[in-house]
Image (cartoon, grey):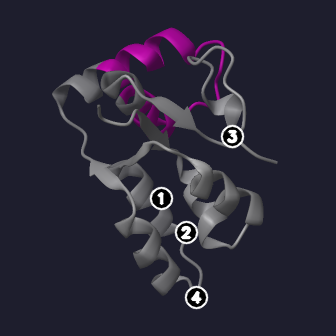
Amino acid sequence: MALPLTVLDTTVLIDLLRGHGPARDYLAGLERRLVCSEVTRTEIIQGLRPGERDAMDRAFRVVRWIGVDESIARRAGALGRHWQRSHRGLGLADLLIAATTQELGAELATSNVRHFPMFSGLRAPYE
């Protein structure tokens, strides 16, 4: 039987890149397949600090990358229509990551819970 999926939000990968112990411990303890949206790759590269390139390359190798296809784009649009009036801070990147998670039937790991109101009961996996 295949392991369940966890989509890692950009915040979790950033914490891992920056050596945040609780993020490293959380990921080491997971018995799940790790995936990320290509949107996360874009956000990481955009915010990369000097000296983080090697850590980024290592982190990028441990996950499976999911591109944005039509079903993800449509779902992200529907999520935006539903949530943006009540949650004005939602950006396109978060909508695409949420849509990817839902399309895969996966769990979302994020330390930025307020950007994902579409997941009831969502909690940060570490402090």
Task: Name the secondary structure under disc 2.
Answer: loop
Helix, strand or loop for the magenta stretch, by majority: helix
The amino acid sitting under disc 3 is Asn
Q: Position of residue 48 (x, y in %)?
A: 54, 75
| Residue topped by disc 2 | 47
Q: Which residue is mark 1?
A: 43
Q: Is residue 96 magenta?
A: yes
Give the side of residue 44 with respect to residue 18, left or right: left
Q: CA distance from mark 4 to mark 3?
A: 24 Å
Which secondary structure lies at badge 3?
loop
Q: Report the residue that reaches farthest toward the front.
A: 1
The residue shown at (49%, 64%) is 44
Magenta stretch bounds: 75-99
Along the line of sight, the residue nearer the viewer: 55 or 2: 2
Q: Which residue is mark 4?
A: 50
Of mark 2 and mark 3, the one earlier in the sequence is 2
Q: Amino acid at mark 2?
A: Gly
